[in-house]
Image: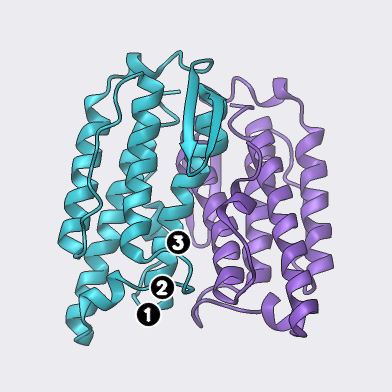
Chain colours: A purple, B cyan
Amino acid sequence: MYQASAPRFANMLRNLAALIDKAEAHCAAKKIEPAALAAFRLYPDMFPFTRQVQIACDTAKGAVARLAGVDVPKHEDTEETFAELKARIAKTVDFIQSIKPGQIDGSEERNIHLKLGPREVDYKGMQYLLGHAIPNFYFHVTTAYDILRHNGVELAKRDYLANP
Amino acid sequence: MYQASAPRFANMLRNLAALIDKAEAHCAAKKIEPAALAAFRLYPDMFPFTRQVQIACDTAKGAVARLAGVDVPKHEDTEETFAELKARIAKTVDFIQSIKPGQIDGSEERNIHLKLGPREVDYKGMQYLLGHAIPNFYFHVTTAYDILRHNGVELAKRDYLANP
């Protein structure tokens, strides 16, 4: 359970921070207003880039905290700039790395109670991790990547997968 | 290893087939040429919708086959229509379901040798599944979803996650 969660989330969040570095460099090179890219949405009722990054962070920290049975740290969603988003990622990675393998291993059957907007859902630990947290996490990281690629930032799959 | 792979891939591929059903209904309702949506790319040098679906299928079947130590079934990339893509998904799910848990469980340390274009990479089973196959699989399913959403198909996160 630990191997499938904390180190994978931390690794991919570092890759996401590196994507943001490339987005910043792209804006500088092309004289694009960084706020325009950070606020970009693939469709008007989809979330902007900033929110994709925030939700990726929240999904990772929430999964690690719930599986370990500790309080989910609160991070206010105030980020607007690329630098602020990288700071959000950094504090999320710090929290993930504060959790020891022994706190998460053995959580396969732990009861997880989740509020998803108006719905309340009960999971077992493994079902929550594999069927909810992991696909949701990669959804938001990938959509962040897709927003940057759609806007011409030069990224390749290698930047997303990096070094497993 | 089985729980983290085969049933998750099969479940998400069924969700992907349901997204394609909604894309078909959208094309019919809006009198859109289905081929235009199937060939859509988020950027000129990104893969079109059809190829995103094919790679999602290939990633899932390749992971399940390699972890089980059986030959990866060959599926030619000939699909152009939504119906053909759903048939591709169905035969991928059939293959995944033909593998028994005992064939995959215990494959954490299995040597996996992969050709990624010009590169050759060696993984251990768990590293391959968690660090390569799973993020790559969700990348292509999410990008398929993002292509449809970007084109106005009415989907929600619920359609992607469905029932874990």
Callout 2 secondary element: helix
Disc 2: which residue: B149
Mark 3 surroundings within 10 Å by alpha-carbon count, few (fewer than 14), some (14 through 19), many (20 or more): many
Res B53 → quadrant: bottom left
- A69 relative to A109 in the view: left or right: right
Label 1 sits on residue: B152
Residue kind at label 1, given as amino acid type: Gly
**Residue picked out by circle 3:** B143
Disc nearer the start of the sequence (2/3): 3
Residue drawn at (84%, 66%) of the image: A83
Mark 2, Cα crowd under 10 Å, few <14 / some 14-19 / many 20+, is some
Residue A161, compared with residue B114, is above or below; it is below
Please state the horizontal and vertical placement of residue A115, each as a whole percent of the image.
Answer: 55, 53
Image x and y of residue B100, in percent: 28, 19
User: Mark 1–mark 2 contact, CB under 8 Å?
Assistant: yes
Q: Foreground residue, A9 or B69?
A: B69
Please, is residue B82 above or below residue B68 in the view?
A: below
The quarter of the rendered structure image containing the C terminus of chain A is top right
What whole-number distance in Å separates the C-alpha atoms at marks 2 and 3? 10 Å
Q: Do discs 1 and 3 share a chain? A: yes
| Crowd tier of the residue under label 1, counting other residues whose Cα lies within 10 Å: few below 14, some 14–19, many 20 or above | some
Q: Amino acid at mark 2?
A: Arg
Can residue A73 be seen? yes
Task: Give x and y (percent) for residue B83.
Answer: 15, 60
A69 to the left or right of A29: left
Is A7 placed left or right of B57 in the picture? right
